[in-house]
Image: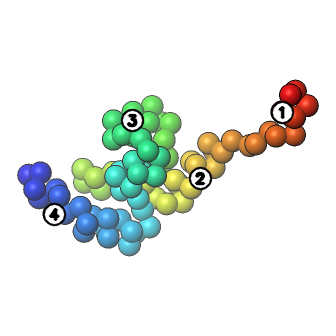
């Protein structure tokens, strides 16, 4: 079964791209998080919106972009200069 998964991986990425989505592996690469962390985010509803396609999890690119925007941290160099 694992060999089949490995062979299907490039095709899965191609299909996910065609429907404007990231795969779970893509999200792991993007966030430098493990699959277990990504799964925890899903269970806690902390990660980006997703949908199930059979037993596959796909993340719409727009949802990932929106989620990343919520994690944006502003630089506060002006305030820090006054403290130092």
Indicate which disc residue 37 carries.
3
- As drawn, which residue projects farthest toward the bottom? 18
Residue 56 location (% of width, % of height): 28, 52
Judged by depth in the image, the label closer to the viewer, 2 or 1, is 1
In the figure, residue 12 lies in which quadrant? bottom left
Indicate which disc residue 66 carries.
2
Query: Marks 3 and 2: in contact by CB < 8 Å?
Result: no
Label 1 secondary element = helix
Indicate which disc residue 80 carries.
1
Residue 61 location (% of width, % of height): 49, 60
Specify which label sits upstream in the sequence, 3 or 4. Answer: 4
In the figure, residue 62 lies in which quadrant? bottom right
Give the distance between the C-alpha atoms of the residues marked 3 and 4, in whole angstroms.
Answer: 25 Å
Give the distance between the C-alpha atoms of the residues marked 2 and 1, in whole angstroms.
Answer: 28 Å
Give the distance between the C-alpha atoms of the residues marked 1 and 3, in whole angstroms.
Answer: 33 Å
Give the distance between the C-alpha atoms of the residues marked 4 and 1, in whole angstroms.
Answer: 51 Å
Residue 57 location (% of width, % of height): 33, 51
């Amino acid at each position: 079964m694992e060999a089949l998964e490995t062979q299907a991986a490039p095709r899965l990425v191609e299909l996910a791209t065609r429907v404007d989505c990231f795969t779970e592996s893509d999200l792991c690469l993007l966030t430098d998080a493990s699959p277990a962390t990504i799964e925890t985010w899903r269970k806690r509803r902390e990660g980006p919106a997703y949908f199930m396609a059979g037993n596959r999890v796909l993340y719409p690119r727009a949802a990932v972009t929106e989620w990343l925007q919520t994690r944006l941290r502003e630089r506060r160099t002006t305030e820090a200069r006054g403290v130092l």
